Amino acid sequence: HHLRELLEFPHKGEPLKLKPEIGEPTSPPEAKKSVRGPVEDTNTKRVNNAAFSRATKRVSFAVIERKANKIEDNSVIRVESRFGDMVSDMAARIEEEKWGTPAAPVAGITSVDFNAKLKNKARKAIEDALNEAWALGVQHSRTELSSARKQQFKIDMARIDEDAAEFLRTSSVRAFGLLNNDMKAIVQQVLMNGIKFSWTTDQITAKIYDELTAAGFIAAATNSEATGRTIDEIRERIGEALGETHRVRTAVRTNLFEAINEARYSTFTDPGLEGFVEALEYSAILDSRTTRICRHLDDRVYPADDPIWNTYRPPNHFNCRSILVPVTAIDTEVVGKDNESGTRWSRRPTVDTQQGFGS
């Protein structure tokens, strides 16, 4: 699975509880902070247990991986299904209105869009996924703090719930809007080509399904069911482009980890902690596939209230799976890499986030 491939934490020792109670210490995973990639790849970072900071040891990376992977897989299925409903409705309207044929005005193509109610259902599927990820982020962040403090603590959950509501609303609208706009552009281009090449409505519909499948919005099985063609026939038409819903998965994965990190940040900066979380450490997965920005940021530590987190809070690129680790008042040995002289804090980053990320 995607998270296991990226994190590659082998399961050793006693299994961890999936839902630890608040205040219950979490045993550190007996695992390397190692990642995928061939053994002979000398660029792969391999760190033994001794190199884990006390703060990092409290993070149940393997458990977060397993839960996030399940959320991702289920969410991709739900979102793709909603997209399938949107395209099916669009196909029926194309047949009825004769869009893409000489019988319909060309000017009207630029205003063609998917059904509003079906769009809202697709957006809601994304919001539900982010809600699950947010809950996961809060659960593990509270467990990590309880493990560090060895006692109960008060967090303003009403404030965190408000943060969640705002995040879920804006992020689901943004994520769906980007996907919807790209899908709509594909449909409109096919309709224009339909007029140009005198396609029938059946040809137009089949082409729309093929283009959306090739772009990673629609599964080949959805295409096959809607158009009555076999997977092999679809494969022959779009060739090597045939694959899984990679565009949907990338969007879901990136936004899920944003939700996890936003929930963690909201928890770690709660005023009720009274400064117990002094700083945050950026924890990335380093291997031959790691982006330049995450390789640069990994192991950097900055105060929890530093405005730098407004720009470099993960995700910092598509498919980013980095997370924030709380450095508490008891973690005196945690020093950020490339630290300022005489301080525990790292120097300011000198690498920009991927376009579209950061503040």
Image: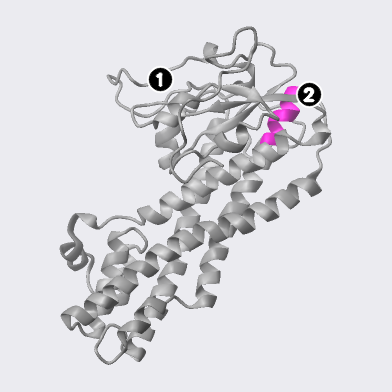
Q: Which mark is residue 348?
A: none
Q: Is residue 107 left or right of residue 197?
A: right
**Along the line of sight, which residue is nearer the eye, 321 or 62?**
321
Separation (CA) of disc 2 from disc 1:
32 Å
Q: Position of residue 248 (x, y in %)?
A: 42, 56
Assign the N terminus to one quadrant of the image. Answer: top left
Picture quadrant where residue 85 is located: bottom left
Assign the C terminus to one quadrant of the image. Answer: top right
* Magenta stretch, residue numbers: 141-149
Residue 125 appears in the figure: yes
* Residue under the point 49% across and 45% down: 69
Residue 126's place in the image compared with 30, above or below, is below
Mark 2 or 1, closer to the camera? 1
Q: Is residue 199 magenta?
A: no
Residue extending farthest front: 107
Q: Secondary structure at mark 1?
A: loop
Picture quadrant where residue 184 is located: bottom left
